[in-house]
Amino acid sequence: MGADLYVYGNHNLNFKNIKYENRSEIIIKRLSNFRIINEDHIKALMIYWEKSILQYPDVLKDKIIKCIERIRNFKNYNWSIGINIEEGYKTNNLYGFLDFVLEFSNDKIYFRNQPPYRYLGWFSMDKIIRNEWRKYLFQMVNVFGGNRVIYLPDNMSNAEKYQDYFDLNDSSFNEIENELINEYGKNNYKLSNMTEDDGNEYYIDYFDDLQKCNNMSTVEFVKYLEDENFNGNKHFYFA
């Protein structure tokens, strides 16, 4: 059974004693004049992600084709925010670019279904593509005062503890981070040279090896995706 990728980022928004309605105002204020610098690269990645799904015989192809067109035509987005109540806890959910959802709790951000890959595939995939997604993740935590994200599988060797503790929205980012380090040890390797021997229960990404600027134009990046060696298995992983 494969594992889905969960991504949690930290933030420094002051939510102490602040009602959820007023938290929304704090979040939106940080986004004034903010724009994702590689948004066209991420749009291209989402299009090719959807195209890679078309190779599977049991998918609803018409639905996928409509989704691709929606992504291709998506522009001039505005940020909006709502309050989500689920299973007894609340989050402030941010919507905007490509209808991605970011869930804000006291000191962390949950990137719901972003990136869309499976957990092991995230560590095995093409580095140029992964770095475009990392650039997006960095920008989203950075604008809210954060500096790192945690990559987690939706199941772990200590799955019961994970389900009972790590996945609760009222658990703080630091609590999750410290528990993971105590349980599995500290990551003493870089994402770029990670091997199977390093263990793969979690990874804390500080983005310190990431070039934050665009190294390719959108045209160059799309060409890279469309090169003669491209196929769904080269760049995108479902495992």
Image (cartoon, grey):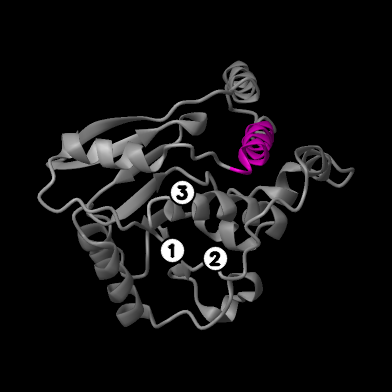
Q: Could you say whether the residue bearing mark 3 is in a helix, strand or loop?
A: helix
Estimate the x, y position of residue 74 in percent, counting from the top left.
58, 23
As displayed, is residue 47 above or below residue 233? above
Measure the C-alpha gap from mark 1 to mark 2.
8 Å
Q: Of label 3 and label 1, which has the lower sequence position?
A: 3
Estimate the x, y position of residue 6 in percent, counting from the top left.
41, 53
Estimate the x, y position of residue 146 in percent, counting from the top left.
39, 59
Secondary structure character of the magenta stretch overall: helix
Residue ranking furthest to the right: 228
Q: To which quarter of the image does residue 128 belong?
A: bottom right
Dot 1 amino acid type: Asn
Badge 2 local density, few (<14 within 10 Å), some, or many (20+)? some
Dot 3 amino acid type: Met
What residue is shown at x 18% (from left), y 54% (from top)?
170
In the image, is 55 to the left or to the right of 1? right
Of the pair 52 and 17, the residue shown nearer to us: 17
In the image, is 95 to the left or to the right of 92? right
Q: Could you say whether the residue bearing mark 2 is in a helix, strand or loop?
A: loop
Instruction: Tell me where the magenta segment starts and ends, as one range.
Output: 37-52
Of the pair 228 and 189, the residue shown nearer to us: 189
Estimate the x, y position of residue 38 in percent, counting from the top left.
63, 43
Query: Is 48 colored magenta in this rendering?
Result: yes
Task: Tell me, yes or no, if residue 194 can be seen here.
Answer: yes
Residue beneath disc 3: 140
In the image, is 76 to the left or to the right of 186? right
Q: Is label 1 in contact with label 2 (beta carbons under 8 Å)?
A: yes
Q: Of label 3 and label 2, which has the lower sequence position?
A: 3
Query: Is 178 colored magenta in this rendering?
Result: no
Q: To which quarter of the image does residue 25 belong?
A: top left
Q: Could you say whether the residue bearing mark 1 is in a helix, strand or loop?
A: loop
Residue beneath disc 2: 207
As displayed, is residue 139 above or below residue 64? below
